[in-house]
Amino acid sequence: MGYLFLANNGVSALKELGVFGLMVNINGQIVDFRFTFQNNIGHFDISTLSEERLIQDTLVPKFGFQMIRPIIAPKVDKNTRSQTYSLDAHPYSFNYTLKNINNGLVQFQHNLYQLKAGKENLLERIYFNASSLTVLREAMYASKYFHPQDGTFKLVFYPAMGQTEPEN
């Protein structure tokens, strides 16, 4: 989670997330580190996110690459919004996925993939559960993924504040 979230919200805001997790590929095996702060119940649904803009900021120093991109994730089925972008000519992509899950929660996922032999391989997923639009907007973060050949990937997520007004 880190400094952005804690600086803006304080430690007590962690309970609003309910669950925060990091999945990472370690030597070809996906390991899931999950922190559960509270079992939340909400009334949140991806249908309310049709015009909610999220911002992705990706920096890969080895490639001299930086991309700041606003995203409005399109609906891919009744319970999922998702959008994937490639890192230009580099063999990587990132994805935002928002999924309806149990108890009126929406799970936010930020995924980093490496493309090998035409197939996406998950390198890192950061995820949390949001019980409201306010919680989704408060959960901005910065993370780093260290790739053995291509070095550091800095991934920053933040909402485009003011796009829509939260009802709760």
Image (tube, grey):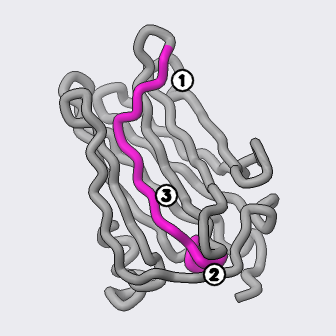
Residue for point 50% across, 31% down: 93
Type of residue at label 2?
Gly
Chain-order first, disc 2 or disc 3: 2
Type of residue at label 3?
Phe
* Alpha-carbon span between mark 2 and mark 1: 38 Å
> Label 1, on which residue?
88
* Alpha-carbon span between mark 3 and mark 1: 19 Å
* Alpha-carbon span between mark 2 and mark 3: 22 Å
Type of residue at label 1?
Asp
> Label 2, on which residue?
42
The tally of labels here is 3
Q: Is residue 66 above or below residue 97?
A: above
Residue 9, x across and y down, in percent: 42, 85
Pointers 3 and 1 in contact (C-beta within 8 Å): no
Res 36 quadrant in image? bottom left
Residue for point 49% across, 57% down: 157
Secondary element under disc 1, as helix, strand or loop, is: loop
What's the magenta region? Answer: 119-136
Residue 42, x across and y down, in percent: 63, 81
- Label 2 neighbour load within 10 Å: few <14, some 14-19, many 20+: some
> Label 3, on which residue?
157
Residue for point 45% across, 58% down: 127
Residue 117, x across and y down, in percent: 44, 8
Q: Is residue 29 above or below residue 15?
A: above
Res 11 quadrant in image? bottom left
